Amino acid sequence: MGSNYGDWLREQREAAGLTQQQLADLAIMTRSHIAHIEAGRRVPSKEDARRLDAALNTGNVLSSFLPREEVAVAGYFEAVRVLEQQAVMIREFALSFVPGVLQTKAYARAVLITSFPRVSEEERDRRLVTRLERAKLLDDPETPVFWALLDEAVLRRQIGGPDVMAGQLDHLVRLAETGRIQVHVLPFALGVHPLLSNMLTLMWFEDQPPMAYGEGLFMGKIHDAPPVVQELQHRYDFALGNALPLKDSLALLRTTARDYERHDRTNAPERRRVEGLA
């Protein structure tokens, strides 16, 4: 048996003398879905595993050894970073930080500088390059369709100082004004909402079932089981229904950015005085 479920599936397929496409045809799946499972980037649903067992004549072995937990993402996002490149639609919910794909260089650097545990400057620069590379996802003017649902805390939490925040919020406004992204804010006045406990990414694909990704402290997890993904989609939709409309969300982003700029100008003389004394 291979080191994981994907290795084992590949061994069973090769032992049966089948290509990925042949197995996909027999199991009524797509070749790319088979490839993602074998590479360890996806976990088949129970129905997928049942069809794979039937196609490979392995009884209920693949179903029995189906991982009971959703896939834990090593290295905080690596599998999702690959999958987001293949998605045709992405919907993000951010609770504390601007989603990585939407971060400016200054904002991303400020996030990485304050990361814990501390990392070397070389490692921080490497992570910054990786994060900025992800932003190229939006270079295509149409795909993926990108929605950002932001808790108001994302706007109010000063990452990198007022100037950095003003630039970041203006960046979000520009992306929305060009129609590249859809952005909505969940205001503090709303109180509790269904996504308050975590960040969430939903992804849809042309030839694979949708998936979800949730992240917490030192933990990221891909959710591939259809009932779980559907429940998370419902939660996102419910929260979205209570968010500010696009026009009002952009107005709030603009107003908050101008507030940061005024704060920065007002405090500039004091900063120069302190720096001069230092």
Image: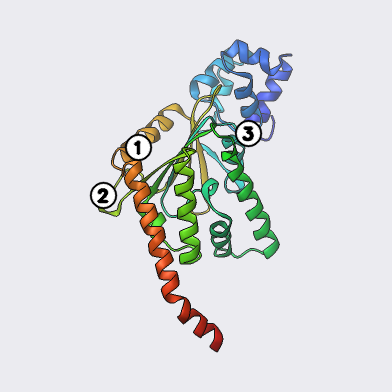
Residue drawn at x 49%, y 51% as measured from the top left: 171
Q: Amino acid at mark 3?
A: Gly
In screen coordinates, is 260 left or right of 205? Answer: left
Residue at the spot of label 3? 40
Residue 155 point in image, percent of width and height: 40, 56
Residue drawn at x 49%, y 48% as measured from the top left: 99
Rounded to the nearest angstrom, the CA distance separating label 3 from label 1 is 27 Å
Residue 22 point in image, percent of width and height: 67, 12
In this view of the protein, can residue 218 be seen by the observer?
yes
When the figure is inspected, residue 203 is found, relative to residue 11, above or below; the finding is below
Q: Secondary structure at mark 3?
A: loop
Q: Earlier in the sequence, mark 3 or mark 1?
A: 3
When the figure is inspected, residue 273 is found, relative to residue 124, above or below; the finding is below
Q: Are marks 2 and 1 in contact (CB under 8 Å)?
A: no
Residue at the spot of label 1? 235
Residue drawn at x 66%, y 27% as measured from the top left: 8
Numbered-mark total: 3
Residue at the spot of label 2? 190
In this view of the protein, can residue 278 be seen by the observer?
no
Dot 1 alpha-carbon crowd within 10 angstroms: few under 14, some 14 to 19, many 20 or more: some
Q: Secondary structure at mark 1?
A: helix
